[in-house]
Image (cartoon, grey):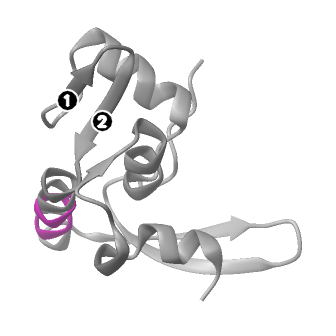
Amino acid sequence: MNASMARTDPGHLPAVLTVGQAAELLGIGRSHAYETVKSGEWPTRVIRIGRCIRIPAAEVLRLLVRITRSASRRPVVYRWAVTSSAVRFAATSAIDTRPCRPR
């Protein structure tokens, strides 16, 4: 298990996450996550203590379960993913699971 996997394994998560950790779990960029928190559109509670921003891990995990359940009811889309070292074939739901990139 690599370090990234250990950080996102639900059994090893702290009670509250940084915005970066929550973004990693949701598969979105850190900058996009901070923008979403700032605009008030973040889908879970946000805890602010001074300049420190934390997000309850349990709520992020519940959000992932809801997303996964709704995705399982959608048709499967097949796509090719090109990585730096290989080309792989991935079956995903109709929800685009690629990380969001700010424009």
Q: CA distance from mark 2 to mark 1?
A: 6 Å
Give the percent coordinates (x, y) of residue 77. 40, 68
Q: Give the residue at mark 2.
A: 54
Q: Mark 2 and 1 residues: CB-CB less than 8 Å, in contact?
A: yes
Total marks shown come to 2
Report the residue at 39% width, 76% height from top.
9
Where residue 4 sits: x, y (%)? 59, 69
Amino acid at the residue labelled 1: Val
Name which residue type carries label 2. Answer: Arg
Considering only vertical position in the picture, is 89 above or below 65?
below
Q: Main secondary structure of the magenta part?
A: helix
Which residue is farthest right?
A: 85
Query: Which residue is at 89% across, 75% downward?
Result: 85
Give the labeled residue for mark 1.
46
In the image, taking residue 39 as reference, residue 4 lies left or right, namely right
Q: Quadrant of the C terminus?
A: top right
Q: Residues within 10 Å of mark 2 (few under 14, many from 20)?
A: some
Q: Residue at x 30, y 74 (%)?
A: 10
Residue 67 colored in magenta in the image: yes
Position of 1 relative to 10 (above/below) = below
Hey, which residue is sitting farthest front in the picture? Answer: 50
* Near-viewer residue (29 or 78): 29
Counting residues from the start of the chain, the first of labels 2 and 1 encountered is 1
Q: Position of residue 75 (x, y in %)?
A: 24, 69
The image position of residue 41, as x and y in percent, is: 22, 21
- Give the magenta range: 64-69
